[in-house]
Structure formats: structure tokens, C-alpha cells
Amino acid sequence: MQDSFHMLLSIQELDIKMIRLMRVKNERKKELEKLHLLQQDVKQQVEKKETQIKDIKMQVRLGETQIKEIEEKVARLEQQQSAVKKMDEFNALTHEMTQAGRERHMIEQKLSDLLDKQTGEEELLVALKENLKATHDNSTILEGEILESINKINQEGRELLEQREVMTKQVNGELFKIYERLLKNKKDRVLVPIENRTCSGCHIVLTPQHENLVRQGDRLVFCEHCSRVLFWPETSVAEEGEETGTTRRRRKKTQAVSA
Ligand SMILES: [Zn+2]
């Protein structure tokens, strides 16, 4: 039982590493997604701008056709006018020609505005396309880096799993089942030492009786508050590198003072 427990503590360290690894992997995956979204966004902006320009060009063509029609109309009116003999007919035609002239002027004004707008939009399109290219180049580099790092994580994960499998065979099956169920729930250390009569998992103080049970070490004792398995620190095989954040900080501080 004790040997199994020690082995399980080592497995737990592997699992914690694995959990951290998966967290990093997920973060990197999210970065990748963000990159793709950004690229997509710029691409859509380019497409939208292209549609806008196409639309403007269509309006310009329409205006040009209208002017051509007016020109033809005026030419027709002039011809008619040269043929009429009555004054009121002549005046009516003049009036119609003036109207046509006004209309033409209005359309020309609109065309000029449209052409200005087109120039502006085309300049924007050039900038957007440059942005798209820059984003693409940038993404390609970053994407390579992220994929490489994910590959490394996968490799590391596979190695951890292999180690774990070897160790798992040496652990009591019942104990291992309990451990796995707890780990699945907590996604954190589930075999935790008592520190100052406190469960180091949930930091709630235990009763002396509870502490005694743990100290005796005859059977598994669970924290009543967080259900983690408690153990007496002396039986710990926790490695040097696995200190808690506080001790590490404290140690660093001491070094800083003595230096
Ligand atoms: Zn607890």
C-alpha cells in the first residue's frame, strides 16, 4: 500500500506536468485560431472594398450612358429646332434643351463625385491589400512557430504517457481508480500533504482526530472538505523541484538579501 502510494505520488507529478502541458497547448491553439480570424477579417475587408469599388464603377458607367443619351436627345432637339417655323414651338424646344442641359450638369456633378470616391476607395484597397499581405506573412511565421511548439508539446506528452504507463502497472488497482477519478474532477493535485494541520489542497484546517488518522497511515484518509487524499508529509516522496510557490519565493528572497 505504501509503495503503491509513493508510486502514485510520482504518477501525480507526471499528471500535473501533463495538465500544464495541455493548458499551454490549448493556449497556443487559441493563438492560432486568433491568427486565422484576423487573417479572415482582413480578407473580408478587402473583398468588401472590392465590391464597393465595383458598385461605384457600375454607377459611373450608368451616368456615362445617361449623358450619352442626353447628348443624343439634345442633338435631336437641335435638328427639330432648325426645322420649326413657329416661335412657340421654337421656344418649347429651347426650354426642353435647357432642361436636358441641367440634367446633364447634375449627372456630370454626380459622376465627378463618384470618380473622386472611386479614387479614394482604390487607395484604401491598396492599403488593405498591403495589410493583408503583411498579415499573411506574419501569420505564416507565427503559425510555423506555434505548430512547432504544439509538436514539441505532443512529443513531451507522449513521453510522459509512456513513463506513466510503466509506473501505473506498479500501483494497486483500487487505489489507482480512486486517484484517477479524483484527478478527473479536480484537474489538480489530489494526493496532498497535511501542512500545519491543514489540507494543502483546499487549505481548510482539519480536526486533530482527522490528522491522527492521516499520521497513522493505515488506510486512505480523505479531506472532508475537498475529498482529496491526505498524507503525512514524512511519507512524501515529493521531489526537490516540486516545492510550493511560497517556499520558492521565500528562498529567492533570502538569496537576494544575502547576496
Ligand atoms: Zn481539502
Image: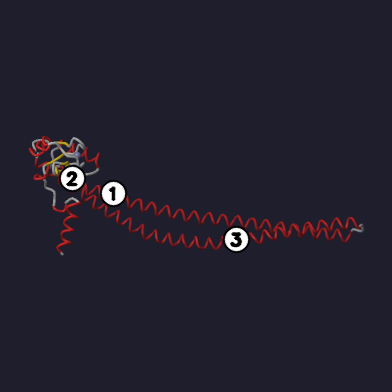
x and y percentages locating residue 69 in the rendered image: 74, 57
Cβ atoms at labels 1 and 2 below 8 Å apart: no
Is label 2 in contact with label 3 (beta carbons under 8 Å)?
Answer: no
Q: Nearer the viewer, residue 120 or 49?
A: 120
Which image quarter holds the C terminus? Answer: bottom left
State the residue position of label 1. Answer: 23
Residue at label 3?
118
Disc 1 marks a residue whose amino acid type is: Arg
Tell me the amino acid under the disc marked 3.
Gln
Q: Amino acid at mark 2?
A: Gln
The answer to which image quadrant residue 168 occupies is: top left
Pointer 1 or 2: first along the chain? 2
From the viewer's perspective, tell me whether residue 109 is left or right of residue 157. right
Mark 2 or mark 3: whose residue is earlier in sequence: 2
- Does residue 5 lie above or below 29 as drawn? above
- Judged from the image, the secondary structure of the residue bearing numbered disc 2 is helix
Q: Give the mark, 1 or 3, whose residue is nearer the N terminus.
A: 1
C-alpha gap between disc 2 and disc 3: 65 Å
